[in-house]
Image (tube, rainbow, N blue to C red):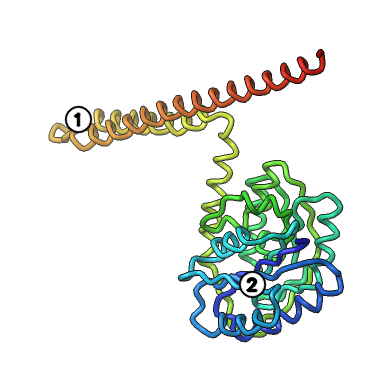
Amino acid sequence: MDLSIVIPVMNEEASVKPLYQAIVQAVDPLNIKYEIILVDDGSTDNTVANATLLSEKDERLKIIKLKRNYGQTIGLYAGFQEAKGKIVVTMDGDLQNDPSDIETMMEKINEGYDIVLGWRHDRKDYLLSRKIPSKIANWLISKVTGVPVKDNGCAIRAYRGEIVKRFPMYSEMHRLMPVITALSGARFAQIKVKHHERKFGKSKYGLSRIYKVLIDMIALKIIFAFFHLPLYGFGIFALISAIISLLIFLVGLYNVFTTPDFSMVTSMGSSILFASLSMFLLFLGIISEMTYKSGDIKIEKLLRFRKLKINQEYNV
């Protein structure tokens, strides 16, 4: 299979048929073997029924129905697990992405890139609720991670199949896939793509998703910053907790001498709590460091064994 097109949909009964027709019209001339995977994310309208009618006439169209609404990330993950294509392209189901961009993305992948990202340079969305928050989020993600992705929210993307198969996904992590894979060494390219105004239905996304992306971004930065130095990472938070514990104790002690009727119970309790947290984080860092170093030693031994085995075979 050359190409898998994965599309999460929810309550898109009006757009399913024109979306399918647009994809077929764009991909058929490429003379490749492809499949279209629609992942229904808990639709309550006739989305599944309309898609089923199309799939009965074209076996290339496959439908995955989730039991309830899990969100776009889980929808994409479900589609990725069923995708058989060497290249996997993702799109939105609202016809704002243009399937004619798929050919350019595949050409870019074949140049040696692992991921090709769409960039909506002429975006047809509301300024205050969509464009401005998106620009702020893209700027923050680029500054925090150091990966200059211009449009993290653009749904049309192309991946090598082996990348999406082993990618862990949760929360709003699908938006940060390019950043995570780039930090892991994957090569990515960005191309300008067409963007159309929504013709059917209503947008499923608003300002409420921004905080989820920001939280995931912070977690991602911490993971990559301290992955190779777990004791250092946990040690920083242990030190902060220790300082807070000491400050609470000193403030309580000061109040005892300046206010005779002051009780140290609350201050001592809070101080002991933060001190315990500090010790817990420190020991957790030590255990993580030992585990990480142990893994390094095992890998080093394995590499030495392989080198030795190769040298022995060569000498013989």
Question: Which quadrant holds residue 270?
Answer: top left
Q: What SS does tag 2 mark?
A: strand
Q: Which residue is mark 1?
A: 256
Mark 1 crowdedness (10 Å alpha carbons): few <14, some 14-19, many ≥20: some
Q: Which residue is mark 2?
A: 62
Relative to 288, say whether 158 is above or below.
below
Question: Closer to the camera, 72 or 57?
Answer: 57
Q: Quadrant of the C terminus?
A: top right
Give residue 272's position: percent from left, percent from top: 27, 31
Q: How many marks?
A: 2
Give residue 314's position: percent from left, percent from top: 81, 17
Q: Which mark is residue 293?
A: none
Q: Earlier in the sequence, mark 1 or mark 2?
A: 2
Question: Closer to the camera, 67 or 253?
Answer: 67
Residue ID at (76%, 15%)? 312
Residue ID at (63%, 19%)? 301
Relative to 98, say whether 254 is above or below.
above
Q: What SS does tag 1 mark?
A: helix
- Which residue type carries mark 2? Lys
Give residue 261's position: percent from left, percent from top: 13, 35
Q: Quadrant of the N terminus?
A: bottom right
- Circles 1 and 2, Cβ within 8 Å, touching? The answer is no
Mark 2 crowdedness (10 Å alpha carbons): few <14, some 14-19, many ≥20: many
Residue ID at (65%, 69%)? 37
Q: Is residue 147 left or right of residue 243?
A: right
- Closest to the camera, between mark 1 and mark 2, is 2
Question: From mark 1 to mark 2, how far is it between C-alphas?
Answer: 72 Å
Give residue 238's position: percent from left, percent from top: 42, 30
Residue that lies at the very extreme toward the top in this rendered image? 315
Residue that lies at the very extreme toward the left in this rendered image? 261
Relative to 179, say whether 289 is above or below.
above
- Which residue type carries mark 1? Val
